[in-house]
Every structure is written in structure tokens, then in C-alpha cells.
Amino acid sequence: AASGECLRTLEGHRRAIFYAVFSPDGQEVLTASQDKTAKLWSVWSGECLHTFKGHAGPVLSATFSPDGQVVLTASSDHTAKLWSVASGASLQTFECHVGPVLSGFFSADGKAVLTSSSDGTAKLSSTVSGERSCECLSTFRHGRRVFSAAFSPDGQKVLTASSDNHAKLWNIVSGVCLLTFTSYCGPVTSAVFSPDGQQVLTSVCDGTAKLWSAASGDLLHSFEGHLAHVFSAAFSPNGREMVTASGDFTAKLWNVATGDCLRTLGGHDSLGGHTDDVLSAVFSPAI
């Protein structure tokens, strides 16, 4: 992040990579691909450690449990799956949605997951209810597809982002919508909490990312500079920086307080840059 230099390229998927994320200890990277697999990689050697096979459609996202021992994948085959990091074995399948599952996210204790879907819902499910489960603990509904869903840092709220041009904040117990963050320029492609839970960051198809107050719903800042859709936005672990991923073939690093763009990563003019849409960008835990 300091220099913008490409440190390593992970090669092995046969089709597009939709998502990439670091393990909690920063030693591995997990990728999700159109080739119907997720892969686990060593950060240092670039070696593929495991390939998670079993979905019948493209794997749209993948993430680690908080302890780094389990992987959650979300697929266009309408399911999400849990996998053992140690063995690569499939542990559990969630069949709660009636459309492609676009994202998955663990609770802080790893005992529940949130999944979002093209069926217009996000669903809360237990990870301790057996090998195969359709049990849904709560459902959070939008008018159109839900691109992402995330827990608040304190585990009391849920944040969703939708193609209905809204992100919504929900009470996890009652299922009541507490706040709506509205985009007047297109679908909200992702929504995340700041590490302290005080702010919400959304990415929008109009080429911007927007920072909101999680308490009042007020718009605090709009980050402008991308030339195409912004597909995702994420905070650094300390909450002082953020990174955006865009269809203009770049990711951008921003100062949250000032709104300044600190660095542009990639692009056709950069050594080792991307030559197509950048669909996701995240920080390593060690930054």
C-alpha cells in the first residue's frame, strides 16, 4: 500500500476472479472464481495450498471465519458452503436462498453467517446446526438483489447493500430496518462498517464511494475520482484509510478524514497493473 508496487500475482484459476481476501493472520489469501472453485494461497510463496471444489456454479465470494479455520463460499448455484481450511473438506451447505448467493460473512464468534442473494434477501443462518441446513434465523428484505451483507462490530446490527439503490441498517434481533442510506445515482454495490462501527461506507455504480454516519444516516463525504462503477470499498484495520475497486481497471487508496486520494493502484499505465475490471480490494491485517 505504501509504494503501490505489485508484490505477487496469484495464477491458477481458469476463469475470472470475483473476490480475494486475506486470512486473519495475513499468511494466506483466499480467492473466489468463475471456474466454480475457491483457492487458498500462501502469501509468501504464491503456492496454491487448497482448491475448494463442490459448487455447481461460479463462486462469487469467499471469506474466512474469525479464527481462520473455516472458509465460507457463496455461489451462483443458490448455495453457500463451509469448508475446512486444514483439509479442504466440505463441512456444511446452506440452501436458504432461491437465487444466486452473492456474498457471505461470519459473525464475530463464527457461530452464524450472513448471506446475500439475487432473490432480494439477506439471511442469517447458524453454523452449528448440522451438515446440511435450510434453517434461517432471520430474513432481511430488499426490493431487488442484495449484493452484500455484513455484521456490525458489536454484532447487534446488519448492513445490506442492494441494486434497489439503497443500503439498509437492520436490528439483528427484531429484523426492523433502522436506517436507509439512499443512492440517487444507481445500485449500491457494497456496504461495510468502519472498525469502530460509527460509520458506514458504500460503493456505488456512479463511480463514487460514500461515507455515512451509522447513527444518523447523514452523508459525511463522497469520494470521487474513479471513471467507472465502484464495485467494492473497504476500511483499513485502523479505519484511517479506505480502498475502492473499480471498473476503470484501478483500485484507489483514500484518506478517510480528508477524502484525499493517496494512491492509484493498477491501471494499464502501471507496471503489473490490471487489464480488466477490479472487482474487489482489501487490506492485509498487518497494515
Image (spheres, rainbow, N blue to C red):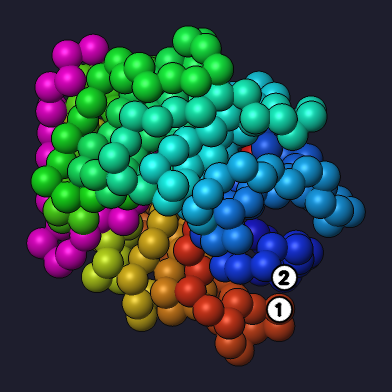
In the picture, measured across the screen, residue 213 lies left or right of residue 150, that is left
The correct choice, above or below, for 164 with respect to 88 in the image is below
Residue at point 43%, 79% (across, down)? 248
Give the residues in magenta.
173-200
Q: Position of residue 16 (x, y in %)?
A: 57, 67
Q: Identify the residue position indicated by label 2 in the image.
A: 5
> What amino acid is labelled 2 in the image?
Glu
| Residue 162 image position (x, y, % from top left) | 23, 49
**Which residue is found at the position 68% from the left and 37% from the top?**
23
For the question of whether residue 119 can be seen, the reply is yes
Q: Residue furthest bottom?
A: 269
In the image, residue 198 sits, relative to residue 239, either above or below, namely: above
Check disc 1 and report its element: helix, strand or loop: loop
- The part of the image, by quadrant, that contains residue 194 is top left
- Quadrant of the image containing the N terminus: bottom right
Q: Is residue 68 visible in this depiction of the protein?
A: no
| Circle number at residue 202 | none
Disc 1: which residue: 272
Residue 124 in picture, x, y percent from top left: 34, 23
N-term mark: 1 or 2: 2
**Closer to viewer: mark 1 or mark 2:** 1
Is residue 24 on the magenta stretch?
no
